[in-house]
């Protein structure tokens, strides 16, 4: 079996442009429901240079919502996902990182052509966002919550911080407290969880220690959407990408597909 055997139909679809897919270096930060699905979809689409980052281990609850198996519980997510991806395509090269920090973020970003941000941590997202701007790299931001999924692509001239009006904007990250991030998340949860989350879990979701509770289809959907935006980027179709201020939101329960211009509703205290 060869790489060409695996992706023969892809070559029939886009011809030699598939070589651009094969050679693009894709980094994925956060290997939960959205990130692990994005990685799986990217490998199935023929990308062979993958960079993965997560600090967590596989827990029983992850098996139902993420791309892991019950016999991988207790393993590092990076190692478990690498194992699964190599079973799909043994010709891929995978580089692993232990989460995102100020110490490793530049190495993580500079070796990638494009980055998918599927992390939960505000602090890590800010650190990544600033590195992306320094290294002039594109980012695909995805999120899943309840039965909803969202996506936007951020060019090197913009940042995640600016898009969501984070309290860290214009400040050293060390000066921003977890309480400030938690207050911001509390406001976000009220907006994105409206008419979906039960009232009794809003307080729990506002805490930074909890990811946004979601069903598997929403995480899978956001991951697949990210993989296809990466595909557009690889074959030179940037003009077809969903780029800020455009923002895609999908509600699976109420059959809503909304592509609109995003404007943050969050106001930070000065």
Image: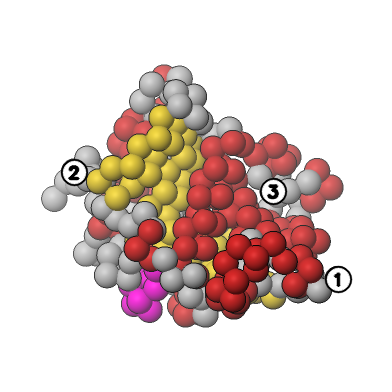
Disc number lying in front (3 or 1): 1
Which picture quadrant has residue 78?
bottom right
Say if residue 6 shows up in the picture: yes
Residue 48 as seen in the image, left or right of residue 195: right
Q: Which residue is mark 3?
A: 67
Residue 40 as seen in the image, left or right of residue 174: right
Distance (Cα) linking label 2 and label 1:
56 Å
- Secondary element type, mark 1: loop
What is the residue that sits farthest to the left in this orientation? Answer: 270
Distance (Cα) linking label 3 and label 1:
25 Å
Return the disc, 3 or 1, that comes first in the chain's sequence: 1
Disc number lying in front (2 or 1): 1
Distance (Cα) linking label 3 and label 2:
36 Å
Image point (55%, 73%), residue name = 17
Picture coordinates of residue 83, whole percent (x, y): 78, 62
Disc number lying in front (3 or 2): 3
Q: Residues within 10 Å of mark 1 (few under 14, many from 20)?
A: few
Image point (27%, 70%), residue name = 157
Q: Which residue is mark 1?
A: 1
Image point (60%, 71%), residue name = 15
Q: Which residues are magenta?
A: 130-138
Q: Is residue 22 above or below residue 269?
A: below
Q: Which residue is mark 2?
A: 267
Quadrant occupied by the N terminus: bottom right
């Amino acid at each position: 079996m060869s790489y060409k055997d695996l992706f023969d139909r892809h070559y029939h679809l886009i011809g030699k442009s598939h070589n651009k897919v094969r050679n693009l270096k894709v980094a994925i930060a956060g290997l939960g429901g959205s990130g692990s699905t994005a990685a799986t979809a990217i490998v199935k689409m023929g990308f062979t240079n993958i960079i993965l980052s997560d600090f967590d281990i596989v827990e029983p609850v992850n098996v139902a919502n993420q791309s892991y198996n019950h016999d991988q519980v207790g393993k590092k997510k990076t190692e478990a996902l690498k194992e699964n991806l190599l079973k799909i395509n043994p010709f891929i090269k995978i580089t692993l990182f232990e989460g995102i920090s100020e110490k490793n973020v530049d190495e993580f970003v500079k070796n990638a052509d494009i980055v998918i941000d599927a992390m939960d941590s505000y602090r890590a997202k800010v650190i990544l966002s600033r590195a992306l701007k320094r290294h002039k790299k594109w980012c695909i931001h995805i999120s899943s919550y309840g039965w909803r999924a969202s996506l936007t692509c951020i060019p090197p001239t913009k940042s995640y911080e600016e898009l969501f009006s984070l309290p860290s904007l214009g400040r050293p990250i060390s000066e921003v407290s977890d309480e400030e991030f938690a207050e911001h998340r509390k406001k976000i949860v009220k907006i994105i969880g409206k008419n979906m989350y039960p009232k009794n879990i809003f307080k729990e979701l506002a805490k930074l220690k909890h990811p946004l509770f979601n069903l598997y289809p929403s995480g899978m959907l956001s991951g697949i959407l990210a993989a296809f935006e990466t595909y557009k980027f690889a074959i030179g179709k940037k003009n077809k990408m969903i780029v800020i201020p455009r923002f895609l939101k999908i509600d699976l329960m109420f059959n809503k597909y909304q592509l609109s211009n995003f404007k943050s509703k969050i106001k930070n205290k000065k």
